[in-house]
Image (cartoon, grey):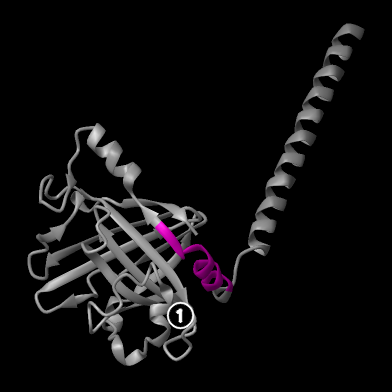
Amino acid sequence: MGTFIKKITVAFSIALVLVISGCKEKAKEVGKTETQVSEKLTLDEQIDEIMRMWPGKYNNDKQCATAEANGEAVWRLDDSGENGYLNVESHYIKLDKPEIAEHVLYVEEYRDHQPDAIYRQRIYTIYEKDSVIQVKMWPFKDKKKYLGAWKNPSMLDSLSVEEISSYPDICDLLVKQVDGKYNMKMNGKDCTLGTKTFNYEVMLSEDVFAYRDKITDKETDSVISTAANYAFHNLNRITQ
């Protein structure tokens, strides 16, 4: 009988230790969750973080090299590899232009390391509306005047709001935090102009700027234009 009682006592002690250990781990998880909640950034703080993270030089040379090594197409300027990944270099420059908006970025992108092969040139303004962070895109009216400003940002000192014209509000990117990254994308089929629907989406983290875009037919949803089957182009940060 004494041996039996001793075994019961030992078993109870082990079970008690396991319960206490489990409670401690649960408390750690709760504490961690509470810390994460308390550290959640406000919308203004998120905008500040985006403005800190986004500026810099990026390219997807690594992605293109991997794609070619795997036998996948890379869409070059001579149209070889058509419909494959584009080889893009991106420059995002923070501007102090309060006459345009509080938070302003200059964007210049080109293909295949050829600065004259412009892929995208815009002003982005980042703002909050109805508790949602949004990115408004502004094409240049004169598409040549400021080309190459990524090499000499002082060229943009004279830029005025009269020289750019924003896309309609329906084409603004809506921003959400997702697993420590910022997801920015147009809202469904909202950005429909004429017979075409435009979709542009961005994922931004500390060292990677990723994007994908496509144009579809408003009525049939058939794809009119895209690259790499609407896969994300992952551009690694090269410089701040």
Look at the image and tell me whether residue 175 can be seen.
yes
Residue placed under numbered mark 1 in the picture: 127
Image quarter for residue 126? bottom left
* Residue 74 x %, y %: 19, 45
> Which secondary structure, mark 1?
strand
Residue type at mark 1 is Tyr
Magenta range: 45-57
Q: Residue at x 36, y 90 (%)?
A: 160
Q: Decide whether the magenta segment is chiefly helix, strand or loop.
A: helix
- Taking the spot 31% from the left edge, 92% from the top edge, the residue there is 162
Identify the image quadrant of residue 211. bottom left
Residue shown at 11% from the left, 70% from the top: 218
Residue positioned 43% across, 84% down in the render: 157
Q: Is residue 160 magenta?
A: no
Task: State the count of labels.
Answer: 1
Which residue lies most toward the right here?
2
Q: Provide residue 97's location: percent of width, then percent of height.
A: 46, 85
